[in-house]
Structure formats: C-alpha cells, structure tokens
Image: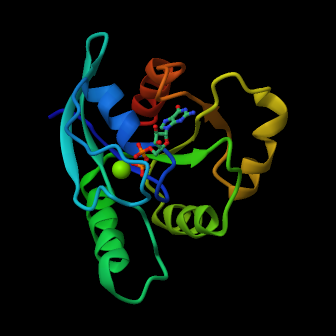
Amino acid sequence: MKPVIALVGRPNVGKSTLFNRLTGTRDAIVADFAGLTRDRHYGNGRVGAREFIVIDTGGFEPTAESGIYREMAKQTRQAVAESDVVIFVVDARAGLSAQDHDIANYLRRLGKPTLLVANKAEGMQQGLQLVEFFELGLGEVLPVSSAHGQGVRSMVETALDLL
Ligand code: GDP
Ligand code: MG
C-alpha cells in the first residue's frame, strides 16, 4: 500500500498549488479566492522511487457552525483520518493566524505524524521570519515554495520518513 499524505491548512495558504506540484496535474482547483476547493481531491505522487497518494482538502474552519465551512471541516477531518501522515501548511508571508492555532491544536490532539510546512517562502530570510511558527508546538517548520518547487522534494522525503 502506498502511504497517504493529507494536505491540511486554512484557505489560501497554497495547498492546491502544492497538490498540483506533487501530482503534476492541475486536478485541484487553484484559486485566488479563499476556500474554493471544497471537496477532497486524490492524486498520485512520486519522489525518486517513493510513491505516495496525496489528498488535497478545502480550508479548515474547526469552529464554523454551519454551511460550507462546516462541510469543509468535515472533509478535512475525513482526509486526515484516511492519511498516514499530515502536512500542515501555513503561509510564511501572512504569518501565524488564529486558525493556524486551532488546526495545530486539533492535530496535536490526534497525535498523527505531522509535518509543519511554511509555504510561499521563496526569497525570504527564512530563519528569522519563521520563528513565530514554533508557537504552534509542532516542532520544526520546513520552508517551501509550492509555486516555484523549492523544498518540495525534501519536504516529501521528510514527511515519509515520519512513518
Ligand atoms: P489553498 O486555498 O490553500 O488551496 O491555496 P491555493 O493553492 O489555491 O493558493 C492560494 C494563492 O496562493 C494563489 O494565489 C496561489 O497562486 C498562491 N500561492 C501558492 N503557493 C505559493 C507560493 O509558493 N508562493 C507564492 N508567492 N504564492 C503562492
Ligand atoms: Mg485549495
């Protein structure tokens, strides 16, 4: 069985861009509008000889009471349940948000192997700007650029090594 990686994070951090980068398809909808990818999307990925399945999810709104956000949260929970390892994506440019804290709390309680990844990190003074993400209590944060492909390969290797 191929390992399954779930991409989780609040809307607009670049999960679908990362999904497309990992699968080499444009299957997931990449949008400038937050939260457009409302369903889970599955794709096949490969890094070197290592094959995996990746799940893209819509945005995660753990406290939403109703409507599309509640449905997106449910989809995300199902994707996490189906996965062997979670890649939790945050936005290196936007910085930490309350939603990031909510998601981190949820993931920490689950205890599933989780890799924290700061996307949109191209051209950044990484060490300094990413320090704030340690607050999430998920350890090291790995800088990547899904749009440019930087760090994506070693991100996958690091995630699969958690298994
Ligand atoms: P999602 O809602 O988490 O699936 O985010 P999307 O993949 O739809 O991307 C949201 C926005 O962030 C889009 O405008 C993307 O072009 C942009 N984006 C995604 N990855 C990167 C990146 O590595 N660098 C930069 N600068 N922008 C990115
Ligand atoms: Mg998306």
Q: Residue at x 26, y 11 (%)?
A: 49
Q: Quadrant of the C terminus?
A: top left
Quadrant of the image containing the N terminus = top left
Image color mode: rainbow
Relative to 55, is 62 on the left or the right? Answer: right
Q: Residue at x 29, y 60 (%)?
A: 81
Q: Is residue 120 left or right of residue 24?
A: right
Give residue 97's quadrant in the image.
bottom right
| Residue 47 located left or right of residue 40 | right
Task: Tell me where residue 62 appears, x and y as whole percent.
Answer: 46, 76
Quadrant in the rendering for residue 121: top right
Judging depth in this view, the residue of 7 and 72 nearest the camera is 72
The single residue placed furthest to the right in the displayed view is 128
Out of 120 and 9, give the one closest to the viewer. 120
Closer-to-camera residue (20/7) = 20
Residue 68 position (above or below residue 128): below
* Residue drawn where x is 53% and y is 64% of the image: 103
Outermost residue, left direction? 1
As drawn, which residue projects farthest toward the top? 48
- Tell me where residue 11 appears, x and y as whole percent: 46, 58
Query: Residue 28, located in which quarter of the rendered image?
Result: top left
State the residue at coordinates (22%, 59%).
39
Residue at the far front: name it. Answer: 32
Counting labels gives: 0
Q: Is residue 46 above or below residue 162?
A: above
Task: Tell me residue 106's x, y (percent).
Answer: 51, 68
Residue 124 percent location from the top left of the image: 74, 27
Depth check: give the residue in front, 51 or 111: 51
